[in-house]
Structure formats: C-alpha cells, structure tokens
Image (cartoon, rainbow, N blue to C red):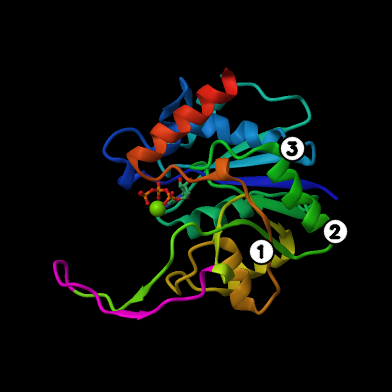
Amino acid sequence: IRTAAVIPAAGRGVRLGPGTPKALRALGGTPMLVHAVRAMAASRAVSLIVVVAPPDGATEVDRLLHEYPLADRTDLVVVPGGQTRQESVRLGLAALPDTIDVVLVHDAARPLVPADTVDAVVAAVRAGAAAVVPALPLADTVKQVEPQPQGTPEPVVGTPERALLRAVQTPQGFDLETLRKAHDTVVEGEGATDDAGLVERLGAPVVVVPGHEEAFKVTRPLDLVLAEAVLARRRA
Ligand code: CTP
Ligand code: MG
C-alpha cells in the first residue's frame, strides 16, 4: 500500500487578517506550511506529499519548500490550487500517480498535528475503513438557530445532544478511489465543508478516530497566539 498526503494551502486566510497568504505566515520563524509538510513527512507511511499552492503562487511555494529539505523517502510536488478548498483538494488529487492507493488530506492551517495522530488515521484506513476522520468531543454546547439579519437576535431551533457530537480535524484519510469518486460526484456548493462530508454524500461509511488538541486549525489571530505557545512548549 502506498500512501500520499495532499495539503490544501491555497487559501488567503481572510479571517486571520490582511497580509501574506495564511499558509506562508511564520510560526516560530518558519512558514506554517513547512510545519504542516513536516507533520505529514513525520509519518513513515507517507511517501509523497502534494502541496496545493495559491493559484498564482505555485512557483514561489515550490522555491520556498526547497529551502526546507525533507527526508529522502518523501517526494514533494507543488500544484496550483483553486477558488475553494474543495476545488483545491480536487486539483491535488489529480496530481497523484496510479501507484497511490491511500490518501491523507491535511489542512496547511493545522501545522501542529502530532505524528501519532497522523499514524492513527493511516492505520485505520489500512485496516479497511474507506474514510477516517480524527475528531474530538466538544467543550461548548451547540445550538441550531434560525439565522436573522445582523443585529436581530436569532431564535433557537434546537440543541443537539453534545455527547453525540465531534469536532472534526485533519488529516482525514481515504481509500483514494473512494475520495476521487466523491470529488467527481458531489457538486460544489452542496454544503460539504470537509472531504469526509463528500464521501458521506455518496452513502459510503465514514469512521472517527481520536483527534488531538494540537491539531487545532489556525483560523483567527488568537489561534496564532496558541500555536506559538504550543511550539515554544515543544521546544522547551
Ligand atoms: N484552502 C485551499 N484553497 C482554497 C481555500 C482554502 O487550499 N481556495 C485551504 C487553506 O489554505 C487551508 C485549508 O484549506 O489550509 C482550510 O481552510 P481555511 O482554514 O478556511 O483557510 P482559508 O480559506 O485560507 O481561511 P479563510 O476562510 O479565513 O479565508
Ligand atoms: Mg476558508
């Protein structure tokens, strides 16, 4: 079995605020994307990494990544991404050779995922699951609301039982054929916000394995503060 990792890194990072594309912002002095690439390369199973760069930035990203060499056993390819995460992942999958049969999809915006979490996802796919997502129980109670114009309080429609909910992370792991079929079948804008969601729409089973606190997504400025602190603790 050969395993590849696709890293969507083509987003701008609007919620993080103006500046360099999010994946290229520094974390502990090193671009976030480099941390994410190293996190995938740390899993011995991963033999190929496809980085999906901003549409107009593939050459620059390729040059940047060559400044941070990986162990010999891991190949690295950079391809340009698209306007949405779903399109970027599809473009990354298109770059995988036929020799690959298991794929991880990992957000560049989750730079600190531990190797054990990556390995657990790979192991579950290799053990026969077609789609595997790492996830954690929620700390907050979740309300479903009836959305209203800004400034108007939103009526609560319901409260799903918190113990049954999981907050989903990446890397998500897939049988490559299953994920390709999902991306080819499910139309953009049908509301799937992760890759496993596309597989669910095919009617194929998806399973959850334990995620990790340090696999959180860097989305807003406060997340960068947390990421810097986690990195400093690791280096101490
Ligand atoms: N992504 C991508 N292509 C896009 C949009 C997002 O490859 N067109 C990637 C991002 O680079 C990121 C991952 O998908 O690694 C998760 O997306 P998110 O955290 O939402 O990042 P951004 O879309 O960049 O952030 P924002 O939504 O705040 O603009
Ligand atoms: Mg986004």
Q: Which residue is mark 3?
A: 43
Magenta residue check for 151: yes
Please state the horizontal and vertical placement of residue 169, each as a whole percent of the image: 56, 53
Which residue in the structure is indicated by mark 2?
Answer: 127
Residue 66 seen in the figure: no
CA neighbours of label 3 inside 10 A, class few (<14), some (14 to 19), many (20+) = some
The amino acid sitting under disc 3 is: Ser
Q: Does mark 1's beta carbon lie closer than 8 Å to ligand 1?
A: no
The amino acid type found where label 2 is placed reads Ala
What SS does tag 2 mark? loop
Instruction: State which mark lies toward you, 3 or 1.
Output: 3
Question: Can you tell which of label 1 and label 2 is closer to the viewer?
Answer: 2
Which amino acid, mark 1? Leu
- Marks 1 and 2 sit apart, C-alpha to C-alpha, by 17 Å
Image quadrant in which the C terminus is located: top right
Q: Is residue 128 above or below residue 112?
A: below
Q: Residue 38, located in which quarter of the rendered image? A: top right
- Relative to the observer, which residue lies in front, 8 or 216? 216
Residue at 45% x, 45% y: name it. 10
Residue at 60 percent of width and 40 percent of height = 113
Classified by dominant secondary structure, the portion drawn in magenta counts as loop
Quadrant of res 219: top left
Q: Position of residue 168 (x, y in %)?
A: 56, 58
Residues under labels 2 and 3: Cα distance? 16 Å
The stretch in magenta equals 149-162
Residue 137 quadrant: bottom right
Question: Residue at (52%, 30%) from the top-left corner?
Answer: 230
Residue 30 belongs to magenta span: no
Marked residue nearer the N-terminal end (3 or 1): 3
Q: Residue 179, which numbered label? A: 1
Residue 35 is marked as none
